Amino acid sequence: MSAVGIVSIAVGLLIMVSRGLLVLAPAATLRWFGGIIQSEANTRIFGTCVLLVAAPMIWAGASEPSGLATVLFIFGVFIVVVSLPALVFFPRAYMAIADGFLPADSDTGLFAWRMLGLAGVVIGAALFMAGLHAL
């Protein structure tokens, strides 16, 4: 079994589930995310979880010389470079930026959020399928 395939399938499923929730229940998903970024401690915990997803991507990406492995490696390194400073070291800055993107009223104007979630589901499905082919 290919480590790249397994990690791609797992990350693809994670993306599909997280973005699928945004498609099906955008108000609840945005409320949940808004609750996560209300305190520095929660934001740091969220950042640590994101880093725990990036670690297998980097490990699997460095293990094989394929295009999918390169994509996983680059995306994993990007997540570490962005999320480590933003979510773990400087959570207040991330909280301010993210709060600016969240709608004030989570019951109106959610069509764009649904489309963003749908795009994420498509990307997750593509990563899932690429992982299946890599096995």
Image (tube, helix red, strand yellow):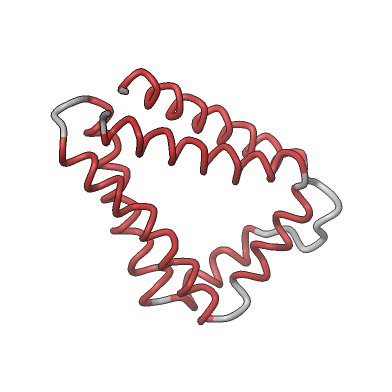
Relative horizontal placement of residue 19, taking residue 104 as reference (left or right)? left
Specify the farthest residue to the right: 107
In this view of the protein, which residue sits in the foreground, 34 or 99?
34
Q: Quadrant of the C terminus?
A: top left
Relative horizontal placement of residue 26, taking residue 132 as reference (left or right)? right
Q: Tell me: residue 100, above or below residue 21.
A: below
Residue 131 image-quadrant placement: top left
Q: Residue at x 77, y 56 (%)?
A: 28
Instruction: Measuring from the top left, give residue 71's x and y in whole percent.
Output: 28, 34
Relative horizontal placement of residue 95, taking residue 10 as reference (left or right)? right
Relative horizontal placement of residue 17, taking residue 40 as reference (left or right)? right
Residue 3 image-quadrant placement: top left
Q: Tell me: residue 74, above or below residue 121.
A: below
Q: Tell me: residue 48, above or below residue 74.
A: below
Instruction: Measuring from the top left, give residue 79's x and y in whole percent.
Output: 35, 53
Q: Quadrant of the N terminus?
A: top left
Residue 84 image-quadrant placement: bottom left
